[in-house]
Amino acid sequence: MDCILDAERDEEQVFGSVMDDIEKALALAQKLGAKDAEIIYSMKRATMINFKKDIIETARCSTNTGYGVRAVVNGAVGFSGTNVRSSLTDCVKNAVGSAKVMDPDPFFKSLPEKADYTPVAGLFDDRIIRMPLEECIDNTMEMISGAKAVSGVEPTSGSFSRSISHVLIMNTNGVFAKKKGTGMSGYIDVVAESGLGYENLATAYDYEVSRSKDIDFFKIGQTAADLSQ
């Protein structure tokens, strides 16, 4: 479960090799006839914990990456995408080929020009990626405890997640921009006994999502329980 920290540690290494691939791909797009081209790369690594009733069922780490390409030919814009790094060349060919058979877009002016872009605050919280797996599990159990703190209410299912994402954009106009962000979330479903039989059970749910480590997981469970009353 160290994949989240690994994603932060190897950021420069990852972006370095990806940038080389993108530069070559942009040059290929122009060689194939594109006036301009742009490529976006994204990588997200996440820890997911799922539970049913009050028992944790799974805890896993996942990694998702992808490339998006757009190419401009005679005022027409073609798009293509892939999540396979070795397929980036084919992705560029598809985008350029698509643009060549499309009609010009009268509303399209140009791809973004090189400029100084204002950083967006509040997207990254270092505390999220440094949470050990044990703390992730504790947060999950806090939701369960919050739900069970209300008499007659039982959790049915739910999940916890935390993630880090990296995004890189480059184009033939000299644009080079990258950002990183974190995320954390909690979700729970509950059921409340009504005393009138199974058909009169009441259900409810609550969730919260944040880019910072500021979620009260006990409160998520408790709020869902209160809503079911």
Image (cartoon, rainbow, N blue to C red):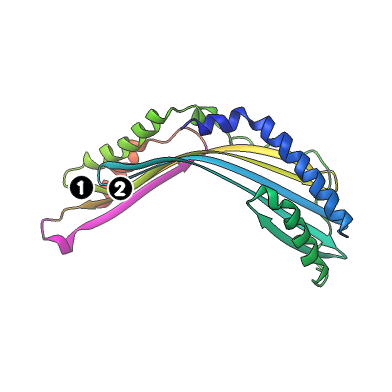
Drawn side of residue 10 relative to residue 110, left or right: left
Q: Secondary structure at mark 1?
A: strand
Q: Quadrant of residue 33?
A: bottom right
Q: Quadrant of residue 108?
A: bottom right
Drawn side of residue 228 relative to residue 137, left or right: left
Q: Secondary structure at mark 2?
A: helix
- Number of callouts in the render? 2
Q: Residue 57: x percent and y percent?
A: 32, 44
Picture disc at residue 153: 1
Q: Residue at x 71, y 48 (%)?
A: 40
Q: In this rendering, is residue 108 above or below 22? A: below
Q: Quadrant of residue 50?
A: top left
**Label 2 Cα crowd, 10 Å radius (few <14 / some 14-19 / many 20+):** many
Q: Residue 113: x percent and y percent?
A: 84, 47
The magenta stretch spans which residues? 195-211
Q: Residue 16: x percent and y percent?
A: 73, 34
Looking at marks 2 and 1 on the same chain, the residue that comes earlier in the sequence is marked by 1
Picture disc at residue 224: 2
Q: In this rendering, is residue 90 above or below 2? A: below
Q: Determine if the magenta segment contains residue 202.
A: yes
In whole angstroms, how far apart are the C-alphas of marks 2 and 1? 9 Å
Q: Residue 171: x percent and y percent?
A: 80, 48
Specify the amino acid type for callout 2.
Answer: Ala
* Nearer-the-camera pick, 41 or 228: 41
Q: Is residue 68 visible?
A: yes
Q: Residue at x 22, y 57 (%)?
A: 202
